[in-house]
Image (spheres, grey):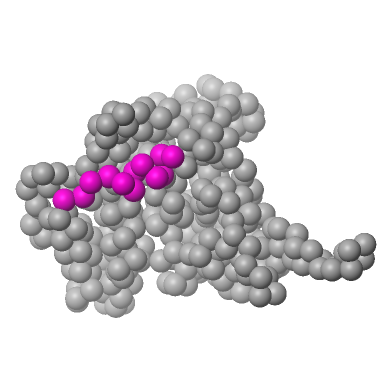
């Protein structure tokens, strides 16, 4: 099959995944697609919103849609790093230590209410999110592929929580907010079956091997030289902006390009266009920026800076040629 035919097949499979997740996460097609783009970019997702809008449901539905191993980690103040990564236990029969893997050794690991964990426990995720392995007593243990951490965070109930440090926020490829459903979606939710029961009955629509093949195909998509330049220019605007204490690093440029490739393939294209970059710039870049206190008082946020960058950086023409 040629690249266009493979891209068409990718788009069909992506649509099947999104449709399956939407069976329980209703009226949120854009958020569902962003989450799946993050998964197929081999990135990690931070879902931040008020309680009861479907953060954990989205994570569980994604896990159920792929025939892969998933695990849920409920973050609490007394959670220990070893509760996530695993421990070495002495086996008297073999007279040796054996590694017992923790729940992070899954294809999709749901870290629920991550800001309730202590900084020491949060830091246990850093190596595995970036290096895709856990080191215990000097021995590295790789996690399976594909691997994705889907973390949820409640921004309103801040008592007894530990805000994520900037270094850990940068490990997430995207941050999204679910938002409230529209009127019709909420009516359909009330009239439908209980969400928990639907999640338990959801059939997987894709095998883990199919997901791995989709990931590999997306990262081979053609990118014209003007688009490399465009991505770097958009990210570079944040580094010298007067309203920011910290701009986006090259990791943001890499993440934006990876996500743009997946979005292009999901649209049935074998090449990316500037619209792919524009659609993903805010969820990929905004959470990596630190706004100055003065700008924050004026109501400025990272998303505003990214939107300005997209307006001010000239859009390349005929980028797929």
* Nearer to us in this view, 320 or 192: 320
Is 57 in the magenta?
no
* Nearer to us in this view, 254 or 306: 254
* Nearer to us in this view, 212 or 39: 212
Q: Farthest front residue?
A: 1
Q: Quadrant of the C terminus?
A: top left
Q: Residue at x 16, y 51 (%)?
A: 224
Q: Image quarter for residue 133?
A: bottom right
Observer able to see residue 96? yes
Return the x and y of residue 305 as percentages of the image width and height: 22, 63
Return the x and y of residue 158 as percentages of the image width and height: 53, 64
Return the x and y of residue 54 as percentages of the image width and height: 51, 41
Observer able to see residue 182? no
Q: Is residue 303 left or right of residue 29?
A: left
Q: Is residue 231 left or right of residue 14?
A: left
Return the x and y of residue 266 as percentages of the image width and height: 32, 36
Q: Image quarter for residue 36?
A: top left
Range covered by the magenta-colored residues = 213-224
Above or below, 89 relative to 6: below
Q: Residue at x 63, y 54 (%)?
A: 105
Is 222 in the magenta?
yes
Above or below, 14 relative to 106: above
Above or below, 85 relative to 67: below
Q: Is residue 64 left or right of residue 182?
A: right
Label count reads: 0
Q: Residue at x 24, y 38 (%)?
A: 270
Q: Image quarter for residue 284?
A: bottom left
Q: Residue at x 12, y 47 (%)?
A: 319
């Amino acid at each position: 099959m040629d690249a266009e035919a493979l891209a068409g097949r990718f788009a069909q499979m992506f649509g099947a995944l999104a449709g399956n997740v939407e069976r329980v996460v209703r009226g949120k097609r854009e958020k569902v697609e962003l989450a799946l783009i993050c998964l197929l970019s081999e990135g990690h997702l931070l879902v931040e919103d008020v309680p009861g809008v479907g953060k954990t449901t989205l994570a569980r539905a994604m896990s159920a849609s792929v025939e892969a191993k998933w695990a849920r980690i409920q973050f609490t103040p007394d959670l220990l790093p070893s509760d996530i990564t695993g421990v070495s236990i002495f086996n008297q029969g073999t007279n040796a230590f054996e590694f017992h893997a923790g729940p992070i050794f899954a294809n999709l690991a749901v870290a629920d209410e991550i800001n309730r964990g202590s900084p020491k426990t949060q830091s246990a995720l850093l190596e595995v999110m970036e290096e895709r392995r856990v080191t215990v007593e000097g021995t590295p243990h790789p996690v399976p592929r594909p691997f994705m951490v889907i973390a949820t965070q409640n921004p309103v109930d801040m008592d007894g929580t530990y805000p994520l440090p900037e270094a850990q926020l940068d490990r997430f490829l995207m941050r999204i907010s679910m938002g409230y459903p529209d009127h019709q979606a909420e009516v359909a939710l009330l009239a439908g079956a209980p969400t928990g029961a639907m999640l338990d009955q959801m059939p997987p629509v894709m095998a883990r091997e199919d997901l791995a093949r989709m990931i590999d195909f997306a990262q081979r998509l053609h990118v014209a030289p003007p688009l490399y330049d465009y991505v770097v220019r958009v990210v570079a605007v944040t580094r010298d902006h007067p309203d920011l204490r910290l701009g986006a690093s090259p990791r943001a440029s890499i993440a934006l390009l990876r996500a743009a490739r997946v979005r292009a393939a999901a649209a049935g294209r074998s090449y990316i266009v500037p619209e792919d970059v524009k659609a993903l710039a805010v969820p990929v870049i905004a959470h990596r920026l630190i706004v100055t206190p003065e700008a924050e008082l004026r109501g400025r946020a990272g998303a505003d800076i990214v939107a300005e960058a997209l307006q001010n950086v000239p859009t390349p023409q005929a980028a797929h040629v």
